[in-house]
Amino acid sequence: MTGQDVVPRLFGTNGVRGVVNTEAMDCRFAMRLGMAIGTFMNGAVIIGSDARTSSEMLKSACAAGMMATGCDVHDCGIVPTPTVQYAVKTDGDVSGGVVITASHNPPEFNGVKCIDRDGTEMARTNEERVEEGFRKQAFRIQPWDRVGHSVSRIDAIADYVEAILALIDRKTIQASDLRVALDCSNGAGANVTPGLLERLGVKCVTLNADLNGAFPGHNSEPTPDNARDLVELVKEGDFDLGIIHDGDADRTIFVDDKGSYMYGDRSLAVAAHYACLDNGGGLVVTTVGSSRCVEDAVAAAGGKVMYTRVGSPVVARAMMEHNAIFGGEENGGLIFPELQYCRDGAMAAARIIEIVAKHGAMSEIQSKIPAYFQFKTKTECSNDMKDIVMRELVANAHGERMDLTDGVKIYFEDGWVLVRPSGTEPIVRIFSEASSSDRATAIAQRFRDQVTQIARG
């Protein structure tokens, strides 16, 4: 690196995260960050949290910091991230929102995610202003008679559920007599999705629907391994669909009626296909990490796909800019602009249930979408080596067709690989896709080994 050193970012791809009660995420950090957020927002703030054991502690500290700057704090309690986002979007008297969550990370992690006034995840330019205030400790501390106050906001879940129900064909769902298995992953979705499915008129059996920040059922990321119990339940219980959330319920993964785990690309493709059919075409936005099956499904319905960098805020803002009818990520994060421009796990569950009710078994629906084989892995890489790894990959791939929209995506005749540094952890993620499982695995492992070798110098 030449010239002045680059100051490390405080915010990653989805907020600030760290191991609880370390310097990266303790009460002092959360309070200082709250003071920086309150100084920037300069008005009432809506706050909520996931079910992690440390969320109440960190929420209190962050809220105290914001109140010290004169901001009133409206506390929604334990709610999904999109519930907070909807509350912010629809309340004209608040300046933004904060969610205490580490999403899919292990239970020892927690984090702080900021929401802009329009309900979207905070734009990077605004995050930079918060970061600057945090580093300079340029806080707008108020005298004793101007500090903010905390009030409970008890209507956030009800308003959010009603908004979803208004967009869904409840009569068709109720007439279909569907049976759904739901795994809430001991997370915040347990406070919303079971009640939503009951209102939709489906018969629902739940797993891990109690709030428990230690995630005793399984870790909070809805991976195939963590969804094994759900898959077995769907197979043995004659269910029409299985649904599993991550810890803050902004993402949803599905299991079809045959008990097949559906990677996020598949549900993204299904939802995108029917969105385009219902709209007579249209633009769908997704990231460079999404499967080719999404583009195939969208094209079959007369639509087009636009690719962006990884990150739901990037996808959401591209959707807003280009008036897209649908969008999302390959990790189960689906964005429905008719409700709000953010990943929304409960809305995704309701929409996919509606699609099944209208068009038949999910196994039949997804069988019509071309299948590609993916493999996802990761390897450790210190933050200061990430740029070096990317430069080496580009140099070693000389002559190959590449896409540098986000990380390094290299195309082959029968597939592709995407190598991308994590924005929140000291790792590099490797995604591959090919016409066969063996080929996809071989591509990913080859590049994982290459990244590991470079990262170790």
Image (spheres, rainbow, N blue to C red):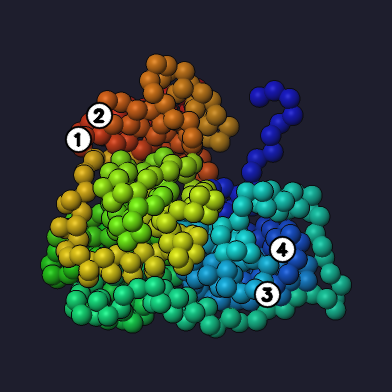
Q: CA distance from mark 1 to mark 4?
A: 50 Å
* Residue 153 occupies quadrant: bottom right
Q: Name the residue rendered at 49%, 35% in the picture.
A: 405
Q: Pointer 3: what residue?
A: 93
Q: CA distance from mark 2 to mark 4?
A: 49 Å
SS of the residue under disc 3: loop
Q: Amino acid at mark 3?
A: Asp
Residues tagged 2 and 1 counted as in contact (Cβ below 8 A):
yes
SS of the residue under disc 2: loop
Counting residues from the start of the chain, the first of labels 1 and 4 encountered is 4
Q: Residue furthest top?
A: 399
SS of the residue under disc 4: helix
Please tell me how many numbered marks the rendered image carries.
4
In the drawing, does residue 385 fall left or right of residue 61?
A: left
Q: CA distance from mark 4 to mark 3?
A: 12 Å
Counting residues from the start of the chain, the first of labels 3 and 1 encountered is 3
Q: Pointer 4: what residue?
A: 41
Query: Residue 334 versus residue 180: which sits nearer the camera?
Result: 334
> Which numbered circle lies on residue 436?
1
Q: Amino acid at mark 4?
A: Met
Q: Amino acid at mark 1?
A: Ser
In the drawing, does residue 296 fall left or right of residue 393?
A: left
Would you place residue 380 above or below residue 328 in this image?
A: above
Q: Pointer 2: what residue?
A: 414
Q: Is residue 398 visible?
A: yes
* Residue 1 occupies quadrant: top right
Q: CA distance from mark 3 to mark 1?
A: 53 Å
